[in-house]
Amino acid sequence: MTTAHINTATHLGDSPVVIDIQGLNKWYGQFHVLKEINLQIRQQEKVVICGPSGSGKSTLIRTINRLEEHQEGRIVVDDEPLTNDVKQIERVRREVGMVFQQFNLFPHMTILDNVISGPIHVRNMPRKQAVDLAHSYLKRVGIAEQANKYPGQLSGGQQQRVAIARALAMQPKIMLFDEPTSALDPEMIKEVLDVMRELAEQGMTMICVTHEMGFAREVADTMVFMDKGQIVEYAPVKEFFTAPKEERSRMFLEQILNH
Amino acid sequence: MSERLAPQDKVPFWRSPQGRAWMFQLCMVGGFLWLAVSMYRNTLVNLKTRGISSGFGFLANEAGFRIGEVTGIPLPQGGLLWFLLSLVAGLAISQLIARQLKSDSGTPMNSKWLSVSLFFSIGLPMLTLYVFRDSIEIAHYTESSSYFMALLTGLGNTLKVTVIGCVASTILGLLIALGRLSPNWLLSNICRWYVELNRNLPVLLQLFFWYFIVLQQLPNVRKSIDLGGWLILNKRGLFLPSLVPQQGAWLFCATIVVALVAIWVLRRRAIRILDETGMPVKILFPALGFLIGLPALAWLVGGQPFTLDFPVLKGFNFKGGTGLTPEFTALVVGLTVYVSAFNAEIIRSGIEAVSKGQREAARALAMNERQVMRIVILPQAMRIIVPPMTSEYLAIAKNSSLAVAIGYPEFVSVGGTILNQSGQAVEIVGIWMGVYLCISLLISFGMNIYNSKVALVER
């Protein structure tokens, strides 16, 4: 059952496993969305999950911070098993940042208040320190001068960068990206991908659901291809793009690369 | 051939859009003027043939009828005038401060200026009230009072019901809404049925229900339910001992205000410390200390602030003390229950209208469920809740006139009596409309200000 994945990204060979998913099953009512998922992710590893819509990619990464609960299997994040214990869930969420397709910024708060909301309310950080931290992250994502505006006054790309800064301000060990560029205009996709690229270079552990294959080829260590709730192919990025083993992933790649 | 046609050239005016608009506009104005003039002349002629003099002079005449429930009217002289003056001045000053700060720095006020403006808008009027307490006179309607006084008393009764109804229906509505949203199947269904039952029955029917069915089941005066004189309940109403202010009463009340201010300062300090160091400060016990300690001290220094006046049975009814008449109770309970069903739906839909993504984003930041509600959901729900809630408050103010049906002497009911006695229909109806319009506009005004504070900033 446990097809122990051989991690071929050699530079990660002996990094500790930070996310360990074993025998994960999830149902929506009668519908079996995730079937026997096994996945290990090492520290500093960049994983890109792709697959046709409805294949369970988003659901999978949302189980990692328990936005979706699973019915069977074991998920251990940063040595913390995910159970029904609220405190345990909150501990996991503190170490796992998430960026959503629809940004989900808090529209009633300024950009700055959005970014400091996590550190202040969850990490009990002094306000001044949180503000300094927020400014440094806003600078990193390139929107330092918009700190006092409201989300409604920013473009989609800017909003998504704020969302990344908000997640980073919690100083997480792992970042989850759930189709971060799917709701953006083409010319804004690049500015968001650039921020993610930089984050990857700095050694963040990242799991990213995306259709941006150029980004995946460049940044990812490992590719995961999902279909109908199952992991169909798990391969180092080079192998996946040059010689995919499975027929299903070959078809998917053809479609997505030659459209 | 090369001649250019300007669009407005040579078009007869009845075929140009502007010309047509003007024509219709003129017809409307003419028609309206004709209607107004003919109504006015018709009224004058009718009043003349019936021998009724018009004008508001009759308001000074003696009323001569009894009003079952009398709300005290503070007389517009001495202390009250100073109080109103300081209230208006205080609000104006704090508004000016807010505006000045906003135009100077573009940011809302900090805590120092907030304290200053709070002092002007609340502290100053309170202080005036305290200083001029002896020159405030409260008049009570008697049969020999004027029609004007009768109308004021009716208005006072209306406002009493409106204010209590608004506050109570909001609190009850919030509880019902939270009940409906609860995962507890039984609770959420009970709340659902409460809403469905109450909003689908006419409010007048509900008033009849409370007044004729519920409150008439109470025992008569001789067989009153009596809890040692502290609480007496019978068909005539609910009787409680009343507080009679003594020498030290003002000092006692003043210390409560001081204690509240102190708690507010304490809270701001706790928030500041939380901001600076990240350490939450518990203020419950010091706050309770202030709230109990200071008034207790005032009691020791100034003597007993209030004595109790117990209701006693004299003749056919209880005298003394204070109480609630069944009419008042039925009206307040009926309106509150009816409107709370609507408020519950407004609050529930407001909370549910905040998108699921907001909740998820807050959870992903590791906020706990209470923080999710307080920091993310409720502030956004408020902007959806406030406008329809304004309509419900207006509904309470206007529906309180249904009290005519159960004999509670509010504004319309008193006005009706005066109309019957004096025959001044035009004037009375005019006063009714004018006063309700004022009340409604005041409520809308206040709610609009609040709404603009919670509204979202868009691009």
Image: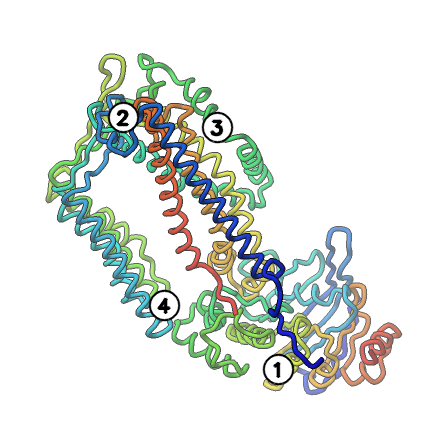
Residue A191, numbered circle: 1
| Dot 4: element | loop
The answer to whether the residues at label 4 and label 1 have Cβ atoms under 8 Å apart is no
Residue B155, numbered circle: none
Q: Return the residue nearer the eye: B355 or B153.
A: B153
Three-letter residue code for mark 3: Leu
Q: Which of labels 3 and 4 is toward the front?
A: 3
Residue B15 horizontal/vertical position (percent): 63, 60
The answer to whether marks 4 and 2 sit on the same chain is yes
Residue A146 horizontal/vertical position (percent): 48, 78
Question: Quarter of the image containing the N terminus of chain B?
Answer: bottom right
Gap between marks 4 and 2 measured at Cα: 50 Å
| Dot 1: element | helix
Residue B230, numbered circle: 2
Three-letter residue code for mark 2: Trp
| Dot 2: element | loop
Residue that extends furthest to the right in the rendered view of this protein: A247
Whether residue B177 sits left or right of residue A130 in the image: it is right
Gap between marks 2 and 3 measured at Cα: 33 Å
The answer to whether marks 1 and 2 sit on the same chain is no
**Which numbered disc, 2 or 3, marks the residue that appears first in the sequence?**
3
Give the residue pinned by disc 4: B108
Q: Return the residue nearer the eye: B164 or B14.
A: B14
Q: Which of labels 2 and 3 is toward the front?
A: 3
The answer to whether the residues at label 3 and label 1 have Cβ atoms under 8 Å apart is no
Give the residue pinned by disc 3: B204
Residue A201 horizontal/vertical position (percent): 62, 86
Gap between marks 4 and 1 measured at Cα: 32 Å
Q: Which of labels 1 and 2 is toward the front?
A: 1
